[in-house]
Image: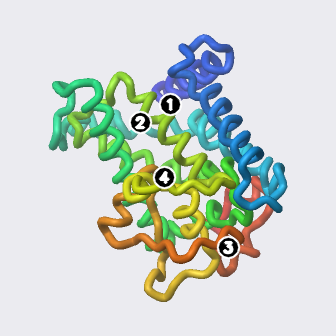
Amino acid sequence: METFLNSFENTLYWIFNMVSFKVHWYKNYFWGLIFISLVVWGLEIIFPWRKNQKIFRKDFWLDAFYMFFNFFIFSLIISGFYKLIGNIFKQYGVSIKSLTLIDIQNFSPIEQLLFFFVISDFFQWFTHVLLHRIPFLWKFHQIHHSVKEMGFAAHLRYHWMENILYKPLKTLAIMLLGGFEPEQAYIVHFIAITIGHINHANLKITWGPFKYVFNNPVMHLYHHSYELPKHKKYGMNYGISLSIWDYIFKTHYIPEVDKNLKLGFKGDNKIPNSFWKQLWVGFKN
């Protein structure tokens, strides 16, 4: 209980310091998230791909609330549990360096960030594939795919169970890198947030020849397609920040671009509209 309460208090203190500008701007995830959101939203307003889509699109405010809930509010709840689990592993001699494959501590800062970014993104891609292919996990991931109009805030609209699923695999990635998160890891986090926002935005960006490396809004729109091709039973274009994994593992699919593509999935009409009811989706059906 002491471990849990201390972790809760530390997380609350961390969030308060960010909100009150007591954290350096380059490490302030609260105001950084707001800044990135406003910039990408501004681009949506100035250069909309689907011009008939409203600025305050369907479920705009619900998605905006999800951003802060998943990034900050849920962190208060779950941080203590992660700390407890970490202490249990330590008691059995399992340290964060137990699975080290590549120790990046002796690399240059740029190399550290590059390895951290690529390895973390691969584990997130792999987790995303599991969310689609394992029926039990798909029940939770349905919340993200219930979006009917794409916009930047849809990026962080996902069930709280996904926090629990992604965090351990991200920790595993850090363990493989020598149990070490680069000092400048905040750069990677902000880049990932920006790319994720753009991928869900009402923008037509493909990155040209770099589309084989970086995910983009056109590619990700098809990930949210209501109709799936027969040879992509579980979905396609699972990339988070990088698209390269989809091209390597043949999970990419980009036919002729249709900006008015119908989004969602069969049965999405059963997803409740209320945030509080969505919290229990996956447990009741």
Q: Quadrant of residue 259?
A: bottom right
Numbered disc in front, either 4 or 1 = 4
Snapshot quadrant of residue 281: bottom right
Check the image and name the residue furthest to the top.
22
Q: Quadrant of the C terminus?
A: bottom right
Residue 9 in view, yes or no:
no
- Residues at badges 1 and 2 in contact (C-beta under 8 Å)? yes
Return the x and y of residue 185 as percentages of the image width and height.
Answer: 39, 29
The residue under the point 53% across, 69% down is 138
Q: Which residue is mark 1?
A: 4
Q: Which residue is mark 3?
A: 261
Residue 210 shows which numbered tag? none
Q: CA distance from mark 4 to mark 3?
A: 20 Å
Task: State the CA–CA distance, disc 4 to disc 1.
Answer: 44 Å
Which callout, 1 or 3, points to the residue nearer the camera? 3
Which of the two discs, 2 and 3, labels the residue nearer the N terminus?
Answer: 2
Q: Earlier in the sequence, mark 1 or mark 2?
A: 1
User: Where residue 277 sits: x, y (%)?
Assistant: 75, 59
Type of amino acid at the residue the image marks with label 3:
Leu
Query: Helix, strand or loop at disc 2?
Result: helix
What type is the residue that disc 2 sits on? Leu
- Label 4–label 1 contact, CB within 8 A: no
- Residue pointed to by mark 4: 207
Which one is nearer the viewer's eye here, 164 or 131? 131
